Structures are given as C-alpha cells and as structure tokens.
C-alpha cells in the first residue's frame, strides 16, 4: 500500500546474507502458535462417562512439525514469487494460446470425445456411476454459472431447484405413473417456475441479501420436504424410482447405467451449446452488464426485472433436469441429499472453475467429484482435505482455475482507410 | 397467559444467543463485506474448549463457580485466537480478490474446522455439564424464569451494552466505525486497517464463544455440527436487522428468536426454522435493507 516503502535495494543485500534465518525464525513462531491453538482439541480427549482423560501428546508433535514445514515452504514460495510475477502472467497466456490454437484444441477435443464414447465399455459399473454423478454436477455447475457467473446473482440455495426436479420426477411418477421422458422437461419446467417464484420477491434485493434469501428458500423447502409426511414421505424419502426407459426394452442395472451415462453426455453437450449461445446473445450481454453495474445497465435500457427473472428461470431449468437425472440414477431420494453443503459444493465448482468460464466449470466439476471418489483411501480425511483445498485454490488462484476472458471486438483502422 | 410468558422468555433466550453470534457476523461484514461462514464454527470450538477444560477441571476435583470461570475464560481466549488465525490464513491473502473468492474460502474454512473437530474429538453428541452453580437467588426466581435463561439474558445484555459503549467511546471503536464506513479514507487518516480487522475478528469470536458456552450449558449436549445451524440462524438475524448495523443485529436476533418461539408454540413445532426463514423473507420483501439497514436503493 505505502509507496514510500519501496526501496528494494536497501534491504535485499543484508537479508540475502542471513539466507533462511528469517524464514526459520518465523516458521518456528507459526508452529508454536498453531501447537498452542490446537492443543485442547487435538491433545485432550475426555470421556465424561468413565471420567477418564486421554492425553494424546504425539498429535501435537505432528502438528508442530507439519506447520513448521508448511510455513517454511510457504515463505520460500512467497520470496520466490515476488520477482517472478511477470513470468507467471506469460505462462497463463501461453496456456490460453494453446487452447485457442485450432491445431491443438481440435485434436484434443477429438481425443476427449472418443474417450467419453469408449469409457462406458471399458470401465466398471462403479466407475460409470461415478462419472455419471460427475456429469450431473457439470450440469449443475453450468446452470449455476448462469446465475452467479454471468448475471452476478449470488445464489446460496441452488440446491432447491435441484430438489424440485428430483421430487417432481419421483412424486409425479409415484402418483401418476408418468415416464422419465415426459417428466424430464416437466421437472425442468417446474424448477423454472420455482426459480421465478424465488426470483420475484428478491428482485429488489442485492448482493448478500439475495444470498441469504435464496438460502432461506432452500432451507424452507428442505424442512418442508422433511416434515410434510403426507406429501413427500418425510425423511425416509421415496424409493423405487424407475430408471429411464428405452422404448420399452428391459435393461439390466449395468446397461441402464451406460444408457444414463449417454443421456447425460448428450444433455451436457446440449447445456454447453445453449450456454455458449446464451453467453454471447443479447440477454447474455445484458446479464454481464447487470453483473458489472446494475445502475449503468438500467440506464442503457436493459429491463433489469426481465433479465434477473430470466437468469433465475434458466439457471433453475438445468438444476431441475439434473434433479430428474439424479432421481433416475439413484432410484432413491430423500431430503438429506439437498442440504446447504450441496449448494456450497456447486458454488465452489463455479468459483473454482472461474466464474463465467464454461471450460473452467467443467474442469472444476470433474475435479471436485472425481478426486474425492478416487481418494476413498483417505475416506475419513476427505472432507477436511476438501475444505483445505478450497482455501488453498482461492489463495493461489483467486480468479478460479480458468478465469473467463471477455470477448474482445477489434477495430481495424486499415479496413476503413482502404475503403475511403 | 403463562404459556405466552414461557414462549416470550424462550424467544428472549434464543434471541440473546443469536444476538451474541450475529454481532460477530455483522461486525465482520461491516468492515470486510464478507459473509464469514466460519463464524459458526468458532462458536462450536468455543463450546468444545469449554467442555474439555471444564471436564478436566472437574476430574481434578474443582467445583462450582471457579470451573465456570476458568472454562469460560479459556474458551473465550481460544476462540478469539482461532478467529484471529482464521482471518490471517483464509481471508487476509484475499483482500484484493473479487467478493466471491473470500466467500468460498470461508466455506472451505467452515468445512475444514468442522471436520477437524470431528476427527480430533468425536462425531457423537457429548453431554455438556451444567456449569451454572445453584444459588439461592436463582432458586427464588425459578418459578418466573429458569436459571440458565436468566444467566443467558443477563450476560448477553451486559455484553451488548459494553460492546456499544466500546464502539462509541473508545479510540479503537472509532477506528472500527471509520473502517466500516470507508476503508481507504480510514487508511489515509492513519488507521491501522490490519489491526482493526484483527480486533474485529477477535471481538466477534469471543462473543461467539460466549454464546457457545451459554447455549451448550442450556441445551446440555454438543457435537461438531452445532455451529452450522447456529451460524445460519445468526446470519439470518444479522441480515434481518440490516447487515453491518450493530443495533440491527441485536434487534434482528430478538425478532428472529421471538418469531421462532411463538411459531413453534402456537402453530407447529416441526417447522421451527421455517418460521425464522419465512419471517426473514417477509421482512425483506417490505424492507429490502433489513430493519435498521442503510438504504442502498439506487434508481436510474
């Protein structure tokens, strides 16, 4: 902040002589502080029933060592990072240039597409299921991306729309026996209606007020589903939801998993196409304008009400579809699948991926769902690692893994000069 | 009438606890415009530390008021240290980033702390000892108000009054208000922003820990997940009162506690939180900036 502090030449020489002394000293302080901080919770374990205290001294040594090393490398990283800022920027643009070069991204796309096609025939049933879940999250991430990434409406209750989709499939099927292919659009439509219902009262709200109201709606929906037994069968949920049918041909669970996988691939492609088109359409640009500055956007003659409601409705549509697919995949749903943690997870996908960036959201969704699945070895430590990873990614890349680049329109002077 | 009085007292007790936690939310929000999702976890850590210290002391043979005092002080100090550290690790590197990045970092911190306590301690409910020692005075009014209700309401009233005085009359309070109003300008006027932010986190976390101890000894059991619900409710209360406004947080918390208490008493006990959230939505439809929030309506 203070510009008068910028005299690099004065200090750097003497600091260099000390080499790591400063870092080691600081790391020791950090380690001592964290050991003190974690002491009661990590070391002491009380058993109030038998009246015994268990002292686990070895834990604190681990904490001390780990935090010392982490802090030491962190400071080395900080020291190295300072002069290298320019290089990092160049690397990023190099990566981006790779992505934008048709010679590179076309073969890459073909490889990815063929992998996606071959995958269900070589992978196990379990792996197909995991992949299907990941694809559901890709859809959810892309849907929330409309609201948060494009329109800048912070939605902490996105899971509500997902629940509406899942429950409309389960309930309409239970009561009226309707099939998957009718209920897929129906679920999407109902979710969109619910999106408008949520959107209407929050039109006047901005920023964090919006966030808490969407969260409130999601919690209300979950609690009602949990308590209104006659309507939603309460916490025990609904089971025996049919899997999607294929022209009446009976499918084994393995076959229907493959079938569902391909349905999801198709829907994800559709989602990507629609969102890509939306992004550069009139309404897409209106959303971006609204995100950047609501006042200026209104002054340009954009109907804020319409744009906001459209964002809610469209975002909810994809969540509704994802919900129907989720119910069809697991064949069992209950309110416990639609907690705030789920909303947080989807929001994390959008922000980690880089808001507004389709490729980023897809990458983040696959990473967030697949990595924990394959890290089941550390099953107890999965969530704590997830939490730590969220913090670390945000610190190292606050803009997300692949921040969205605005499309630029270039104005060529030469063309005009030639014509005149 | 008696039933009404019970519900009223229940609402007051609930509201006081929510207020203690909501103050931390609203103070941090006022200065950083950040929804500190890890705040509920600090409250939970406060309750756990108090439980651990109190159990150790009881097993060593201490009794009565001294256990409550020592456990309370240690828990408050520890929670303050946690709040301070959380800010340094998860939020300080993100000061310049866009608004959503610290939010995700906060959610990450919340998940991290929950699982940290779960792994280091237990995922089961632990019985929380009743730390409030019996006294003649409390017994004499017990037909009017339960001892823990009385202590909760009394403590939070004292804390809220002293916080208001601190903000209004001390130099630090002035610096905090200045930072909340305009960070750049406060910096130019010589306010040490980093210190103000740290102190905000320390005060907020101590209040949350106090809330944690009080509610844990009121309810009688805790687990690693209690912070989430309390956090969401307190955040709701802060928004209801107008986030960033300290009297707003107190008022919002009391209103929320009342809405929940009367809702469960007169309508249905299954939908406790539904009343709170529905009340919030209703209020925000008519007053989009909360009860005491500054109006931010902008029109073309």
Image (cartoon, rainbow, N blue to C red):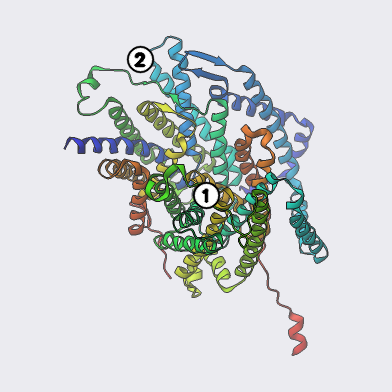
Q: Position of residue A182 (x, y in %)?
A: 53, 64
| Marks 2 and 1 close (CB-CB < 8 Å) | no
SS at badge 1: helix
Q: Nearer the viewer, residue B65 or B284?
A: B284
Left or right of residue A144: residue A175: left
In front of the other: label 2 or label 1?
2
Query: Taking A94 as reference, is B273 above or below it?
Result: above
Snapshot quadrant of residue A285: bottom right
Q: Which residue occupies the extreme right position in the image? A: A103
Count the numbered circles shown.
2
SS at badge 2: loop
Where is mark 2, residue-wise? B64
Q: Which residue occupies the extreme top position in the image? A: B61
Determine which of the numbered discs, if any, sits on residue B188 in the image: 1
Chain identity of mark 2 = B
The residue depicted at 58 percent of the width and 40 percent of the height is: B90
Chain identity of mark 1 = B
Left or right of residue B271: residue B185: right
Q: Nearer the viewer, residue B159 or A100?
A: A100
Distance from the alpha carbon under mark 2 to that under mark 1: 51 Å
The residue depicted at 74 percent of the width and 54 percent of the height is: A89
Q: Is residue B161 visible?
A: yes
Query: Taking A103 as reference, is A125 above or below it?
Result: above
Left or right of residue A143: residue A210: left
Who comes first in sequence, dot 2 or dot 1? 2
Q: Position of residue B106 (x, y in %)?
A: 54, 43
Tell me if mark 2 has few (under 14), some (14-19) or many (20+) residues whose alpha carbon lies within 10 angstroms of its own: few
Q: Position of residue B240 (x, y in %)?
A: 36, 49
Determine which of the numbered discs, if any, sits on residue A135 in the image: none
- The answer to whether tags 2 and 1 share a subunit is yes
Q: Position of residue B137 (x, y in %)?
A: 23, 20
């Amino acid at each position: 902040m203070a510009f008068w502090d910028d005299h690099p030449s004065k200090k750097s020489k003497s600091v260099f002589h000390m080499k790591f002394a400063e870092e080691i000293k600081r790391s020791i302080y950090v380690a001592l502080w964290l050991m003190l901080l974690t002491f009661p919770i990590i070391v002491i374990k009380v058993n109030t029933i038998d009246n015994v205290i268990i002292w686990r001294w070895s834990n604190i040594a681990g904490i001390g060592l780990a935090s010392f090393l982490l802090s030491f490398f962190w400071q080395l990283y900080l020291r190295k990072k300072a002069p290298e800022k320019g290089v990092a920027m160049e690397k990023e643009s190099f990566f981006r240039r790779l992505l934008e070069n048709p010679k590179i991204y076309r073969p890459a796309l073909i490889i990815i597409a063929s992998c996606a096609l071959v995958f269900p025939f070589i992978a196990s049933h379990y792996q197909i299921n995991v992949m299907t879940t990941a694809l559901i999250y890709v859809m959810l991430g892309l849907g929330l991306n409309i609201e948060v990434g494009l329109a800048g409406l912070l939605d902490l209750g996105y899971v509500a729309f997902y629940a509406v989709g899942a429950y409309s499939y389960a309930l309409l099927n239970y009561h009226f026996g309707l099939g998957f292919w009718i209920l897929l659009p129906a679920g999407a439509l109902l979710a969109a209606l619910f999106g408008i219902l949520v959107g209407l009262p929050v039109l006047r709200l901005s920023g964090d007020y919006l966030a808490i109201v969407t969260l409130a709606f999601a919690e209300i929906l979950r609690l009602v589903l949990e308590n209104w037994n006659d309507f939603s069968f309460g916490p025990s949920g609904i089971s025996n939801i049919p899997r999607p049918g294929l022209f009446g041909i009976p499918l084994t669970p393995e076959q229907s998993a493959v079938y569902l996988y391909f349905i999801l691939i198709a829907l994800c492609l559709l989602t990507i196409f629609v969102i890509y088109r939306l992004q550069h359409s009139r309404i897409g640009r209106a959303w971006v304008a609204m995100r950047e500055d609501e006042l200026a956007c209104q002054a340009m003659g954009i109907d804020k009400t319409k744009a906001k409601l459209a964002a809610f409705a469209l975002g909810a549509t994809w969540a509704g579809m994802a919900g129907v697919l989720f119910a069809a995949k697991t064949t069992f749903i209950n309110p416990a699948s639609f907690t705030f943690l789920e909303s947080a997870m989807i929001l994390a996908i959008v922000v980690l991926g880089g808001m507004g960036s389709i490729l980023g959201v897809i990458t983040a969704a696959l990473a967030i769902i697949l990595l924990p699945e394959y890290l089941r070895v550390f099953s107890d430590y999965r969530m704590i690692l997830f939490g730590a990873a969220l913090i670390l990614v945000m610190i190292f890349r606050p803009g997300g893994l692949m921040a969205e680049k605005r499309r630029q329109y270039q104005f060529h002077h030469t063309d005009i000069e030639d014509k005149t | 009438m008696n039933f009404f009085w019970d519900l009223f007292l229940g609402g007051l007790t609930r509201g006081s606890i929510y207020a203690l936690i909501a103050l931390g939310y609203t103070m941090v929000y006022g200065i950083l415009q950040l929804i500190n999702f890890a705040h509920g976890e600090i409250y939970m850590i406060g309750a756990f530390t108090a439980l651990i210290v109190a159990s150790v002391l009881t097993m060593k043979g201490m009794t009565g008021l001294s256990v409550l005092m020592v456990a309370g002080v240690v828990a408050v100090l520890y929670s303050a240290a946690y709040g301070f550290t959380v800010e340094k690790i998860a939020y300080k590197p993100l000061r310049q980033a866009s608004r959503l990045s610290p939010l995700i970092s906060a959610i990450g911190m919340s998940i991290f702390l929950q699982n940290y306590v779960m792994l280091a301690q237990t995922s089961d409910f632990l019985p929380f000892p009743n730390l409030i020692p019996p006294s003649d005075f409390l017994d004499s009014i017990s037909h009017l108000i339960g001892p823990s209700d009385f202590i909760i309401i009394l403590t939070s009233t004292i804390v809220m009054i002293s916080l208001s005085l601190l903000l209004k009359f001390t130099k630090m309070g002035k610096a905090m208000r200045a930072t909340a109003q305009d960070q750049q300008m406060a910096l130019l006027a010589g306010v040490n922003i980093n210190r103000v932010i740290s102190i905000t986190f320390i005060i907020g976390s101590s209040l949350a820990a106090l809330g944690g101890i009080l509610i844990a000894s009121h309810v009688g059991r805790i687990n690693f997940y209690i912070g989430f619900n309390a956090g969401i409710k307190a955040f709701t209360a802060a928004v209801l009162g107008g986030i960033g406004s300290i009297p707003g947080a107190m008022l919002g918390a009391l209103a929320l506690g009342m809405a929940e208490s009367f809702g469960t008493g007169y309508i249905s006990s299954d939908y406790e939180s539904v009343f709170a959230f529905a009340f919030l939505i209703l209020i925000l439809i008519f007053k989009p900036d909360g009860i005491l929030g500054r109006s931010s309506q902008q029109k073309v």
